Image (cartoon, rainbow, N blue to C red):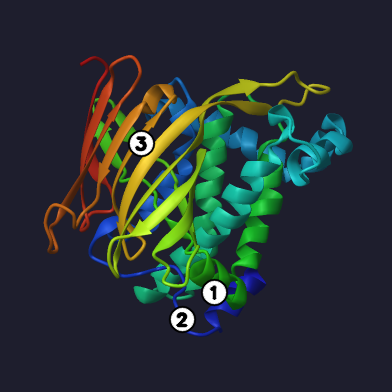
């Protein structure tokens, strides 16, 4: 990974993913928003609130570190055959043993792109050694995500081992190659459409966090119609229609994570899978920078989500954005974000 950081720093000045736009999701992209969206993403499928206390910082962080510091005994107990077939290669389609899907899509592709994009952000803002800063940021949000996912009593487990030791580093290496970054940026329009994220203070919690990635593959010569995919803790496919040279409306349907289920331990080693439910959404973007979205899903905490990014309601330096989210039990979350702040401010009501 250090060699890849040197390679990017010594490479050309082309920015494949970062765009210094004052509108849309691009205007909210920065290292802090990436750490929060990536680190707290897994709370979207938990039944516990994303409060500071519910991170179980000391025990969960220790659990993750112990797993990745000494992975071989854990894999030996879990079983190499199960580990390889469940985490590394798509040998079957059983959802309970298909953890390779998020490994490839979220960690290899998504995590690799985030490394390259945040590296470009550091470069555009004149940070020294931007690729090294990007590597540290990419590995940090992934570690934080594993801490949030593990909880206080989830040791030993094998879930964090392929994420932190295999796929995230491979993503960093892969997207250090300019030809790879150019292919995903130019041909597939891969980009970060993560949520506008905010904090609330009563209680102190991270609200509306969630990573989201978009892919578009043109279906005609004019690029007016594209196959569309948006994914994160969910996956949807559909179509994207150009309204003019800059604006596009996209819509899709698919499945989302509605919860996590612990699988029977294998020789004392824990693992988990997810429960799936339907999801649909519509998105409006300008130059692949998301301006607004509405999604409806079976996810308990995020049944209905409305996102409005800076630049849609007004233009200028202080253009606001907002989000509104409803759970299936009537809880509501509302937040305000600004493109001059790394995160916004939010309020939460457990009952309408």
Q: Of marks 2 and 3, which one's residue comes earlier in the chain?
A: 2
Identify the mark at residue 295; answer none if there is no mark: 3
Q: Nearer the viewer, residue 254 or 169?
A: 254
Tag 2: Cα neighbours inside 10 Å, few (<14), some, or many (≥20)?
Answer: few
Q: Is residue 335 left or right of residue 1?
A: left
Q: Secondary structure at mark 1?
A: helix
Q: Of marks 1 and 2, which one's residue comes earlier in the chain?
A: 2
Identify the mark at residue 182; answer none if there is no mark: 1
Q: Could you tell me which residue is drawn at 65 percent across and 21 percent down?
A: 262
Q: Is residue 159 above or below residue 183?
A: above
Foreground label between 1 and 3: 3
> Percent from the top left, x then y, of residue 73?
84, 36
Q: Nearer the viewer, residue 281 or 340?
A: 281
Distance in Å between CA atoms under marks 1 and 2: 9 Å
Distance in Å between CA atoms under marks 2 and 3: 34 Å
Q: Secondary structure at mark 2?
A: loop
Q: Could you tell me which residue is drawn at 54 percent across and 36 percent down?
A: 147
Are the two marked residues, 1 and 2, in contact with CB atoms closer than 8 angstroms?
Answer: yes
* Residue 28 visible from this viewpoint: no
> Percent from the top left, x then y, of residue 68?
70, 43
Foreground label between 2 and 3: 3
Q: Nearer the viewer, residue 77 or 285?
A: 285
Q: Is residue 40 left or right of residue 244?
A: right
Q: Secondary structure at mark 3?
A: strand
* Residue 165 visible from this viewpoint: yes
Q: Which residue is mark 2?
A: 14
Q: Could you tell me which residue is drawn at 11 percent across and 56 percent down?
A: 314
Q: Of marks 1 and 3, which one's residue comes earlier in the chain?
A: 1
| Quarter of the picture holding the C terminus | top left
Number of marks: 3
| Quarter of the picture holding the N terminus | bottom right
Residue 225 occupies quadrant: bottom left
């Amino acid at each position: 990974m250090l060699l890849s950081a040197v390679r990017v720093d010594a490479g050309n000045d082309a920015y494949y993913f970062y765009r210094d736009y004052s509108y849309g999701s691009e205007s909210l992209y920065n290292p802090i928003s990436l750490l929060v969206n990536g680190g707290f993403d897994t709370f979207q499928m938990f039944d516990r609130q994303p409060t500071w206390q519910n991170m179980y910082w000391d025990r969960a962080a220790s659990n993750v570190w112990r797993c990745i510091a000494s992975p071989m005994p854990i894999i030996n107990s879990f079983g190499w055959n199960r580990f390889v077939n469940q985490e590394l290669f798509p040998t079957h389609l059983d959802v309970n043993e298909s953890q390779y899907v998020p490994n490839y899509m979220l960690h290899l592709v998504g995590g690799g792109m985030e490394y390259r994009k945040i590296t470009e952000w550091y470069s555009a803002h004149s940070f020294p050694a931007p690729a090294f800063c990007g590597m540290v940021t990419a590995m940090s949000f992934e570690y934080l995500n594993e801490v949030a996912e593990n909880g206080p009593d989830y040791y030993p487990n094998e879930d964090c081992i392929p994420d932190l030791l295999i796929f995230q580093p491979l993503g960093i290496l892969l997207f250090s190659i300019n030809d790879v970054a150019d292919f995903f940026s130019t041909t597939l329009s891969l980009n970060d459409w993560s949520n506008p994220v905010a904090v609330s203070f009563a209680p102190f919690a991270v609200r509306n966090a969630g990573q989201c990635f978009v892919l578009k593959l043109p279906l005609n010569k004019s690029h007016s119609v594209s196959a569309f995919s948006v994914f994160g803790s969910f996956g949807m496919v559909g179509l994207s229609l150009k309204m003019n040279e800059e604006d596009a409306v996209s819509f899709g349907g698919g499945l989302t994570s509605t919860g996590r289920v612990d699988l029977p331990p294998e020789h004392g080693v824990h693992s988990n899978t997810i429960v799936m439910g339907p999801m649909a959404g519509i998105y409006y973007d300008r130059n692949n920078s998301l301006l607004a979205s509405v999604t409806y899903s079976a996810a308990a905490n995020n049944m209905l989500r409305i996102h409005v990014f800076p630049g849609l309601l007004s233009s200028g330096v202080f253009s606001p954005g907002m989000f509104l989210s409803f759970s299936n039990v009537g809880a509501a979350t509302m937040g305000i974000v600004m493109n001059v702040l790394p995160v916004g401010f939010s309020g939460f009501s457990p009952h309408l």
